[in-house]
Image (spheres, helix red, strand yellow):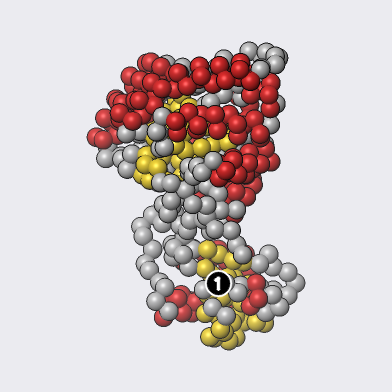
Amino acid sequence: MLPVRRHTRTVSIGSIKIGGTEPIRIQSMLTCDTTDVDACIEEITRLDAVDCEIIRLTVPNQKSVDSVPLIREEMRKRGIERPIVADVHFNPKLAVNVCEFVDKVRINPGNYADRKKFEVREYTDAQYQEELDRIEQKLIPLIKNLKKYGNSLRVGTNHGSLSDRLMNRYGDTPEGMVESAMEFLRILRKHDFEETVLSMKSSNPKVMIEAYRQLVQKMEKEDMHYPLHLGVTEAGNELDGRIKSAIGIGTLLCEGLGDTIRVSLTEPSENEIPVAKSILQSTRSRIYNTDFISCPSCGRTFFDLASTTEKIKARTSHLKGVKIAIMGCVVNGPGEMADADFGYVGSGPDKINLFHGKTCVSRNIPADHAVERLIELIQECGMWSDPPENNQIL
């Protein structure tokens, strides 16, 4: 049996909801200085144009906090209504202050109330509890303001920034990452705050995958059902960054885990969105366009498979949720395309068989006319719609 999506509570981020039965949401993060309002607005505009659903920005100082309402006002003037998330490290006061102006706050449990000193020491249970009590006191003002302004919170654990306390007890391990998040979750729940999202990010997809798996197991034991934000941090750029992200995020999506994702690329932030959509589409976690199935071709193929595939994609990629198979020959074609809605299968030199589901409806159509006949078949079956203007192919 294929895994089903993990059930979570639903968390609101402004006008967007994540978790529960909501679609898996896509987000990105601004690369510019938050105090440069004009640069932020230009980048937000580009992200809005490619349908980035949640936008995060960094808040490293009070001047950045003061810039956020200016950014929100300019967004309103431009008609951009995207939730804004403040990313805060090291300074709890900034997290408290920014609540008034954003929809969600992200904190790192490894540095919210701790400064990493790389100290090696043994903690007694009493000393460890004293540290947790100290963290609780640091969190209480944030919890109060999150409630006051109706905000959600992401507890975002990073593999490379565990506190000295966690490092000494668990090491730099997935177990340590999970416990870092669970400590904060227990405090948040103690103070009746449930609007929480979790992430377990690492630049190593293996570590990231294992940390998320362990987190889910740990939360299940404590009757916690918070949504997950998936991402491989510092994935890199170009092909390497895309493959690393697809491995980490895609693996977990295929296991039914994940409620919002970010592909972290060392590129303009808007480049992340098509990759995220492709990962969701490929794992069939969220469908944006047509789902294409095509074989790699071989000596049995009697038509130009590559050019034909591109021709069919150009005509049909806007058909959201429709699955089309383009197969080179009848040896594997009918079997490999078993779950496709429509099939375009080579039957001989420049001859094509067309399928609707598993049924062959037209045989030995000349290749010159087969693409048009495929379009007609889709129309006849009531699954055609005209393409929108400026249709984007993933």
- In screen coordinates, is 250 left or right of 197? right
Q: Establish if 285 lies above or below 220.
A: below
Quadrant of the drawing holding the N terminus:
bottom right
Visible in this render: residue 37?
A: no
Q: Give the x, y percent position of residue 154.
A: 46, 34
Q: Residue at x 73, y 75 (%)?
A: 300
Q: Give the x, y percent position of residue 97.
A: 35, 20
Mark 1 residue crowding within 10 angstroms, few (<14) / some (14–19) / many (20+): many
The kind of residue on which mark 1 rests is Ala
Q: Establish if 22 lies above or below 384.
A: above
Q: Foreground residue, 215 or 332?
A: 215
Q: Give the x, y percent position of residue 85.
A: 40, 32
Identify the residue at the far right of this view: 299
Q: Residue at x 70, y 26 (%)?
A: 171
Q: Establish if 283 lies above or below 183.
A: below
- Quadrant of residue 330 within the rendered picture: bottom right
Identify the residue at the far left of this view: 77
Q: Residue at x 60, y 34 (%)?
A: 178
- In screen coordinates, is 326 left or right of 74? right
Q: Secondary structure at mark 1?
A: loop
Q: Give the x, y percent position of residue 372.
A: 48, 76
Q: Foreground residue, 343 or 129?
A: 129
Identify the residue at the far front of this view: 126
Q: Residue at x 30, y 39 (%)?
A: 80
All told, the count of numbered labels is 1
Q: Label 1, on which residue?
A: 340
